[in-house]
Image: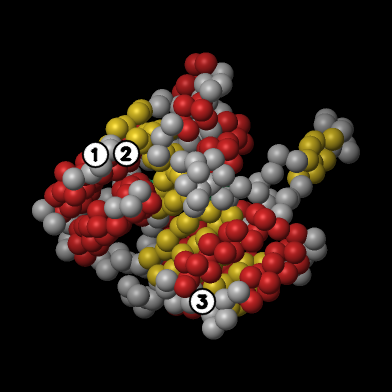
Amino acid sequence: MAAHKIAIIPGDGIGTEVVPEGLKVLDAAGRKFGIDYEFTHFDWSCERYKDTGEFMPKDGIQQLSGHEAIFLGAVGWPGVPDHVSLWGLLIPIRREFDQYVNLRPVRLFEGVRSPLAGRKPGDIDYYVVRENCEGEYSSMGGRHNRGTEHDMAIQESVFTRRGVDRVMKFAFELAARRGKHVTSATKSNGIIHTMPFWDERFEEMKKAYPGFKTDQFHIDILTAHFVQHPDWFDVVVASNLFGDILSDLGPATTGTIAIAPSANLNPEGKHPSMFEPVHGSAPDIAGKGIANPIGQIWSGAMMLQHMGHQDAHDAILKAIETVLKDGGPKTPDLGGQASTADLGSAIAEVVASS
Ligand code: NAD
Ligand code: IPM
Ligand code: MN
């Protein structure tokens, strides 16, 4: 099989620390399962922005488009306003490549303590399917009367029938392979244009999936249910902003957000998909070598799955499970003292010997 062409963008902060661990595990899986890669490394980051005034070159999207997938660490660093860095790199990639699904699994592993009393593996095991190209994340709107007492900001949300339907369809298709249960995150009691529309499209989509269990909750009470009844959920479909919030909350209930991966998918495969942890650049711990690399490593597993290597994906997941369960190295967020490299190497070794 031809080598998989993969773009590597470590980005900022701990992104540069966890990406090498992700690559370590990808290499181990490659050797084990006979998968070849051709990696292209990009230094696109806040540092590059400070030096050159841009995050990626003018033809950056075009450069990436020659790749099958993108493996990204994190973007954002103090000194550069976050909306500038994220709209300079991460968000354009999601949009230009029409990565309209942001798939974020939430799972409690054996050997990791949930902050929710009495919860054990199996109690927390669901997916957040986040709309990733429109919704509340829009460039429409503006600032008015800057510097006056009438200073104001308007931010418009954009929900299209095509955009909503395709992410909901993805959620139902995913649920078809799991528990046939889809939950919709809404807020149609307060947001009176977009969210009633979202509900309408959910009602319509349900009709195509008879026999499925469906429910919907307003986002406020849904966050409470994530904490009090995580066992209720199978697949949760949400708008861009609601999905963003739910996909930090969910992993936090599984002990640490640092293990959470994400797949920014262009499901039709017309464009590259992007794989990155849910977490950010963590300036508070960057440079210390203590970041947990599991979110990055699991994202690598999702990338292999996307590229057709289910066996390699499963082996990496199993290795993560084994290391967490069997008293392997744990980084401080998991209650241990291990380094990023200790944990990454332990997982790579289990993959190699699997
Ligand atoms: P963050 O995820 O970077 O950090 C939140 C907290 O979680 C911090 O205390 C951090 O130390 C901890 N944490 C995160 N990842 C960890 C890991 N792998 N191991 C151990 N602990 C970890 O969120 P933030 O502080 O809101 O954002 C910091 C910067 O990252 C900002 O510039 C933000 O915009 C950016 N960000 C980028 C992405 C992305 O690139 N996809 C995602 C979220 C935030
Ligand atoms: C994420 C991040 C990004 C988002 C930020 C950094 C723009 O929080 O990937 O979850 O909101 O999508
Ligand atoms: Mn987020």
Q: Which residue position is annotated with label 3?
A: 181
| Residue 118: x %, y % from top left | 36, 78
Q: Nearer the viewer, mark 2 or mark 3?
A: 2
Q: CA distance from mark 2 to mark 1?
A: 6 Å
In the rendered view of the protein, which quadrant contains the C terminus?
bottom left
Residue 311's quadrant in the figure? bottom left
- Which amino acid, by three-letter code, is at mark 3? His
- Which amino acid, by three-letter code, is at mark 2? His
Q: Residues within 10 Å of mark 3 (few under 14, many from 20)?
A: many
Give the mark nearest the N terminus, 1 or 3.
Answer: 1
Residue 4's label in the rendered image is 2
Kindly state the secondary structure of the residue where label 1 is placed. Answer: loop
Residue in view at x 59 percent, y 64 percent: 168
Residue furthest out toward the front? 1
Kindly state the secondary structure of the residue where label 3 is placed. Answer: strand
Q: How is the image coloured?
A: secondary structure
Give the mark nearest the N terminus, 2 or 3.
Answer: 2
Q: Nearer the viewer, mark 1 or mark 3?
A: 1
State yes or no: discs 2 and 1 in contact (Cβ < 8 Å): yes
Is residue 285 depicted above or below 215 in this figure?
A: above
Q: Nearer the viewer, residue 309 or 225?
A: 309
Q: CA distance from mark 2 to mark 3?
A: 34 Å
Total numbered badges shown on the rendered structure: 3
Judged left or right of residue 201, residue 49 is left
Residue 36's label in the rendered image is 1
| Residue 64: x %, y % from top left | 46, 31
Give the mark nearest the N terminus, 2 or 1.
Answer: 2
Q: Nearer the viewer, residue 337 or 135?
A: 135
- Which amino acid, by three-letter code, is at mark 1? Asp
Residue in view at x 68 percent, y 50 percent: 136
Residue in view at x 17 percent, y 63 percent: 326
Judged left or right of residue 59, residue 349 is left
